[in-house]
Image: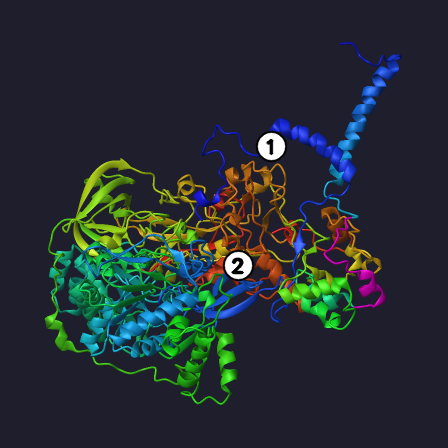
Amino acid sequence: MRTLIKLKSSRLKTILPLALASGLGLGVFWFWYKLGDNRGYAPDQPIPFSHELHAGQLKIDCQYCHAAADQSRHATIPSMNVCMNCHSVVRIDSPHIQKMKTLIEQGDSLEWVKVHDVADFVFFSHKRHIAKGIACEKCHGKVERMQKVTQQERLNMGFCVECHRKEKAPTSCDTCHH
Amino acid sequence: MSEKHWKHPEFEQGQDERPEGVDRREFLKLMGAALAMASAAGCARRPVEKIVPYLNKPEEVTPGVANWYATTCGECPAACGMLAKVREGRPIKLEGNPDHPMNQGGLCARGQASLLNLYDPDRLRGPVRSPLRQAQGTARSVVRSPSWEAVSWEEVDQSMAAILKEVKEKSGALRLLTGHIESPATQKVIDEFLSQFPNARQIVYEPLALEELREANRLSYGEAFIPHYRFDKAKLIVSFGADFLGTWLSPVEFTKQFSQRRNLHDGMMNRLVVFESYPTVTGSNADLHIPVRPGNEIKIALGLAGEYPMEKAAAETGIDLSILRRLAADLQKHRGESLILGGGYSLKGEIGVALHVAANHLNHLFENEGETIEFGTPSHQNNRATSDLKNLIREMKEGRVDCLLIYKANPAYTLPKGAGFEEAAAKVPHTLSFADRVDETALKAGWVLPDHHYLENWGDAEPIEGLLSLRQPAVAPLFNTRAFQESLLKWTRDQGPGTRDQQLWYEYLKNYWNENIYKKFGLTSSFQTFWETVLRDGIFDSRRSANTYSLRKFNTNILPTLKVPGPWSLVPGPLLVTYPTLPAYDGRSANNGWLKELPDPVTKMTWRNYVALAPEKAKAEKLKEGDIVKLKTDDGTTVELPIYIQPGLHEDVAAVPLGFGRTAAGQVGNNLGANAFAFAAPVLPVTIEKTGQWMKLPTTQQHFQVYGRPIIKETTFAEYQKNPKAGNEEVIPLPSMWSGHKYEGHRWGMAIDLNACTGCSACMIACQAENNIPVVGEERVKQGREMHWIRIDRYYSGDENNPDVTSQPMLCQHCENAPCETVCPTLATLHNEEGLNVQVYNRCVGTRYCSNNCPYKVRRFNWFEYLWKEKSPLAMVLNPDVTVREKGVMEKCTFCVQRIQEGKDKAKDFGRKVRDGEIKTACQQSCPADAIVFGDMNDPESKVSQLKKGPRGYHVLEDLNVGPAITYLTKVRNK
């Protein structure tokens, strides 16, 4: 079979395959580079809870809701009764609050979608980082300005280790992997 | 849990089938597509994870932080104090309660493994009923349909009300067959329940009962009881077969006491002399181990007491006279500080009683009463039994029992074939079982009303008189089960349907403690405070106020009436001895994969039972290991089992472990080995026939000789007293080509005292629970692919036929110049700055070079994905602080790095340094003998540094110069 496109110059004959190959190479590189990079991830939540409103305008302390952040590995999502501390009187006419109320009455909880998610084999301790005085926004970004929570940092091993090196925190494998 | 249930069906079944999923070509295609998709989609996260918050978070629960509840172990009648570690509402590990005066923080392998029974997928999900129909012809005989139908508790209560009313009105016979009841409150519930019927009785049946000991004490002291033994006060212990370090009465407590006089901390050491006819943990720790033919023990005991000519005893038992003479002299020397124990579970009947009486006499002669044997606080850890059961079976056969309730007993499995329990059960119109599964006995019942697992239930226990402990639920009931006590209370207090009050038993228990304990001691605090204190501590020790010493007078008139020879002991030829082993006990937890794969501490066999024969006997019979033989007793009972060659056995003994061959235990424990309870008695004349078949045995250790290598270093106590470095004098020059590591902070290390270690294997289960170690199954064990991070190696030295035994816990040595680290192509295993040899699972590609290069053979490879999630709810037992490893990944002991992190985290919270002894590895924590010490070797004051520097410290295979972080302390024998 004859080639459909006749290449006029011999220079082009060498450049084009090279360009294609390097393009593909870049593509592969980009693919692996992007793999696991979840920056910008902002899934829809069961109700459009706004951190901008609660943490930004109303200035509710992070740990009012994420209460175990200084006691446990997990920052924890507030239990439903914490929401109802205010919402049994505040904005009870909102359809979202009503949805929540109905769920509670049924004995169910909201199923929030995890945004910031380190790999399963990483044991990250919120407690240790808070005790060191590291601000929440260092990893989570300016949540108080987010209508919808979006992942800001890569939260991969490079991200962790970079900071650990700078702060002279332990970098032994077993610090996080066990 | 075995591999057949766990492993993803890989290549074994239907190897020619195309595996599901993606092949290489397709993978490339998809890769291309994915590349394009990824470029387009940007950040599509996989997988999407959900967080479901609590509706109302219980105040005491913090996700990620463990809660500890003090409770009481329910696995065996010893009832040790226990702490349950609970994460997010589910128990994930059991540890001994350090404040409990009995077990002092230790917990045996079975106690720890009983956690897995909670998550056993074969547990009943709720009550079931087997539809009854009258068989044609025999009016009273009932044939039961094998199909079970689920019922609700309301239906159960309604039907029970009718049945009990009927029984009551016609003055019918109601019988309650129970196992050992450790709980005084439960006993009261039972008594109250039975008191409403004109003809009701409780029968207590425990297959491994110390009936003979109780009877002997009745003859000797006028009361059937079991005293409290004090091994910590005994300098010379003589046991005639009682396996007090393995299965007898209260092994964890006894190991704690025993090891206190064994660790040479004060330079002193006790001496253990064991005469035994079957291989036990106690026997393998003896300083002087003498195999005897069953029945001959009594001659030795009476010989030592001077009631039987010692020359005759020596001649008849084949024991060197000088040994007996020396022992008698030793006993004289240790008046008031020796302890003589009679036979174990296997010596039944008159001869068993006679031996215990002889032991009592010896204790009386050598003034041990009131010293090493305490009468004031008797043990309640074993109940009387079987003779009552014979009456019950007769009654049942005659059709005189109208309603039979069975709780914590499995007579259809644990009674001899000839006992006829099954036929008798068919003649009882109403049979109820409270078993947690449809076991062998429940199969004969009309109803199975599953009881809670003990971790889901309230309760109490009084293992030693005056020492009370509480049991509290560590988890809400997983299934639709109901406490046995709740059922009885319900049927006692309201016979009609309607009110369904789950709190009956709790309120009853609380009230019982108020009336019978709180008020009795006239405490100043309020009852609520008292109750909360006991709940928190787990125990209430009232022995301080009780009279701890009361002298009982040994009745010497009993001695001439003792019948020395037993009926079978006169028959020449081999004797069958069936005996309990530490992992299997009486077979109650046969469906527990952890225990099934736990090597027997003495024989190192897993998964199934065997006939243990002495080497010379096997040679004479031309039998080799694995040959399957047929054991036949006079009554025609036959059992086929493989041969296992066990040095240290008496020539005439064929020993068979109990607790195997269950048929209705569940998918893990069914049809493994043969049921040794089938024989009419534990000791019987037997014939051994070859079948010509052979099988590979699932052992974890194949050879036991040291061949002169520096693995075990041992000496005698006499040598040790002259020179503490005895046995460890050799200095090996260690030139090194490595520059060494620098440790600026901690440097973790361990010391293991071989003299304290009894080989009980509690550490193995502790490690398994802590570190999410899978069970691989019998076939994989045969291939040497078991996954235990810590194992107990057992070595023999001395006489080939009756060797000295050393148990050596072997785990990753965290070498300074680790041979595994240098060969890993991906840096998946490396040295960290605290001296740990860490394994990074994510980097591991499974070349197994490291395992090949490890001189200690402690690395384990995941040949398969041992899918925890396959069988619900088993995955709930997993420790969330430890990664679950995948197929193709190497793993090994981490020195419990998660516990180290936790300890450091705690120290940081308080802004201080980690204290010595604060961080305990799982194996160390569980050790009933305190043989394991973990700590910082950079701290010269730490216990581990002290032990390392001490004269007894050595490294295994020191000449290799790998620089292990684990120091072993020489084994010292008090010959």
Circle 2 residues within 10 Å: few <14, some 14–19, many ≥20: many
Q: Quadrant of residue B781?
A: top left
Q: Image quarter for residue B449? A: bottom left
User: Which of pointers 1 and 2 indicates the residue nearer the eye?
Assistant: 1
**Closer to us: B417 or B194:** B194
Q: What element carries label 2?
A: loop
Which residue is the site of mark 2? B921
Name the residue type under label 2: Thr
Q: Residue at x 33, y 61 (%)?
A: B247
Please provide percent x and percent y for residue B440. 31, 55
Q: Quadrant of the C terminus of chain B?
A: bottom left
| Residue behind mark 1 | B22
Q: Is residue B420 above or below residue B831?
A: below
On screen, residue B933 above or below B956:
below
Query: Is residue B257 visible from the viewing direction of this image?
Result: no
Residue A52: in magenta span: yes
The secondary structure that most of the magenta stretch takes on is loop
**Residue B725 as seen in the image, left or right of residue B934:** left
Q: Numbered disc 2: what chain?
A: B
Who comes first in sequence, dot 1 or dot 2? Answer: 1
Closest to the observer, B270 or A156: A156
Question: At which x and y percent is residue B109?
Answer: 41, 58
Residue furthest right in the image: A9
The Cα atoms of the two marked residues, 1 and 2, are separated by: 42 Å
At numbered mark 1, what does the secondary structure look like: helix, strand or loop? loop
Q: What stretch is highlighted in magenta?
A: A41-60
Q: Which amino acid does label 1 sit on?
A: Val
